[in-house]
Image: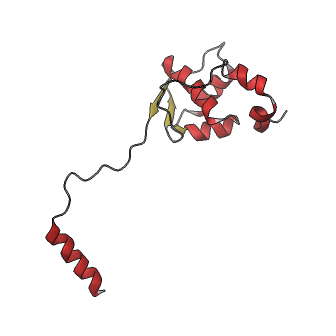
Amino acid sequence: MNRRSLHREDPDRLYTVIGGRSNAGESGFDAVSLVVAESAPASGMQSEHLQILAMCSNPTAVVEIAARLALPVTAVKILLRDLLDQGRITVDHPTSAAAPTRLPDRDTLKQVLLGLQKL
């Protein structure tokens, strides 16, 4: 069976991979969260957990992990939650650009507008 079609052709296998769970709870993961492995894989771990730890030696986005594992992002979030609860990964949530603490004064904006109009 092609791994790319795992979640479409073998729902029983997907159900087994995620232990029958349907969501990762309040994980806070989003598609662009960066995951970093904090420990080496241990014997007896689920194969998907082993693969995640191996690929996350450098920061790796959740969506990239899902693509490499050929699993839905929601399933990967469940697997990541397991690893996070075990202290095996850390997650960095990208931040948006900080809002300016002070807006330019009105006179400066007028000068910029006049300069643009002269162009």
Residue 114, compared with residue 98, is above or below; it is below
Residue 94 is situated, as x and y percent measured from the top left of the image, at 42, 42
Residue 92 is situated, as x and y percent measured from the top left of the image, at 44, 35
- Furthest-front residue in this view: 22
Q: What is the count of numbered marks?
A: 0
- Furthest-top residue in this view: 44
Instruction: Note whether residue 36 is visible.
Output: yes
Residue 7 is situated, as x and y percent measured from the top left of the image, at 74, 33
What's the image's color scheme?
Answer: secondary structure
Instruction: Note whether residue 39 is visible.
Output: no
**Residue in the picture at 43% in, 37% down:** 93
Quadrant where the N terminus is found in the figure: top right
- Furthest-bottom residue in this view: 118
Residue 9 is situated, as x and y percent measured from the top left of the image, at 81, 33
Q: Viewed as shown, does residue 87 lie left or right of 102?
A: right
Please name whichever residue, 76 or 107, is drawn nearer the observer in this view of the structure. 107
**Residue in the picture at 71% in, 36% down:** 70
**Residue in the picture at 47% in, 25% down:** 26
**Residue in the picture at 77% in, 27% down:** 11
Residue 117, compared with residue 68, is above or below; it is below
Quadrant where the C terminus is found in the figure: bottom left
